[in-house]
Amino acid sequence: ETELVVIDENNINAEAENAIKRAGEVIRRGGLVAFPTETVYGLGGDALNPESSKKIYAAKGRPSDNPLIVHIADIKDLELITDGVSEAALKLAKAYWPGPLTMIMNKSDKVPLETTGGLGTVAIRMPNNKIALELIKASGGYIAAPSANTSGRPSPTVARYCVEDLGGKIEMIIDGGQVGIGLESTIVDLTSEVPMILRPGYITADMIEKVLGEVTIDKTIIDSSSNLKPKAPGMKYKHYAPKGNLTIVSGPQDKVVEYINGETKKAMEEGKRTGVIGTDSTTSLYKADTVKSLGNREDEKTIAHELFKALREFDDEGIDVMFSESFDDSGIGQAIMNRLLKAAGHNVISL
Ligand code: TXA
Ligand code: MG
């Protein structure tokens, strides 16, 4: 039996405080709690307890070589779990924490290998969500939390999808409403000579460069044809995928519309349910069972916010065949296209 509690992040009253305290106790005792962050919902357990991390892998059906992110609520708490806090880490933390940035550092012995997927490094972030920060404090300071979805499915941006994937498997789910950002945090590895982005997100390469002077990007993020292994173990898996078959179509707008409408027509004739992901100015042009807009094409924050939600909704609606427009690859667009390409299994038609 999974307990569901609803908390308004902007009104954490006595009742909410009480629920967070109880959730903290669940985690201290080795149990699991799904909770909101500003990026996506997380599935939290005690990061310093190897049994908790094993439970997280089991609940998600996640391969145990795919390490978890440790969430903290106080910069001082870096000391216990790392082997020393570098100048670069402090600068980045001051600039972007709490916020959607995860840093990889060398771990101390306090962090069990179960949490880091056997690695000598640990991923750490301080989320920018009041419920999350209070929960971290209530549970002893260190919550290991991957996204709160079944492994491979799109990350949950609302609590309903945590219930769908994890209901009955964990002790508690905190519903804190829809998340603000909608894509997982940027991951930057600070253990390499030049800091390297392993997963693009809301904090862009430019924003990190501004603080550190120099940053590189894991080549496997940019070049999908690369045979190299991604440095973040989780990035090698098919991910964020809806149940139906998704194809990205890029090219001039009129050609994209013509192509997609031809494909949806064929699919519908075969009795399949079809869906299209477009933008505000194009949705009226498509013919399909469901057409969704991710927002204004120029507004990449909204597009990021709506993407996983749209993919999950297609699943809810039983869509078999989906097509999506392609998006600009700069700024937050890099994160958007990274997730969209993975969701589509790199299935792209260029016209
Ligand atoms: O926004 C987020 O980061 C969300 C919320 C809940 O905080 N969490 C999240 O966790 O996205 P997860 O487990 O879905 O993704 C963690 C990623 C994986 O790709 C994993 O391989 C990578 O971080 N990672 C974790 N520890 C690592 C390490 N020591 N070295 C390299 N990559 C690491
Ligand atoms: Mg995930």
Image (cartoon, helix red, strand yellow):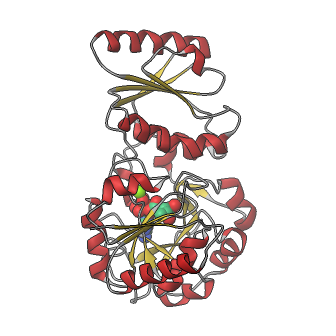
Q: Is residue 30 visible?
A: yes
Location of residue 349 by image quarter? top left
Residue at the extreme front: 15
* Image-based side of 71 in relation to 116, left or right: right
Tell me which residue sits at (39%, 57%) in the image. 162
Quadrant of the snapshot with the N terminus: bottom left
Tell me which residue sits at (34%, 83%) in the image. 112
In this rendering, the count of numbered labels is 0
Against 262, is 323 above or below? Answer: below
Question: Percent position (x, y) of residue 136?
Answer: 51, 80
Question: Percent position (x, y) of residue 115?
Answer: 35, 75
Q: Is residue 225 visible?
A: no
Question: Percent position (x, y) of residue 153?
Answer: 35, 48
Against 182, is 351 above or below? Answer: above
Asked whether 161 or 342 is in front, the reply is: 161
Rendered-image quarter of ligand 2: bottom left
Question: Percent position (x, y) of residue 279?
Answer: 61, 28
Against 67, is 231 above or below? Answer: above
Against 282, is 23 above or below? Answer: below
Location of residue 297 by image quarter? top right
Residue at the extreme right: 210
* Image-based side of 43 in relation to 292, left or right: left
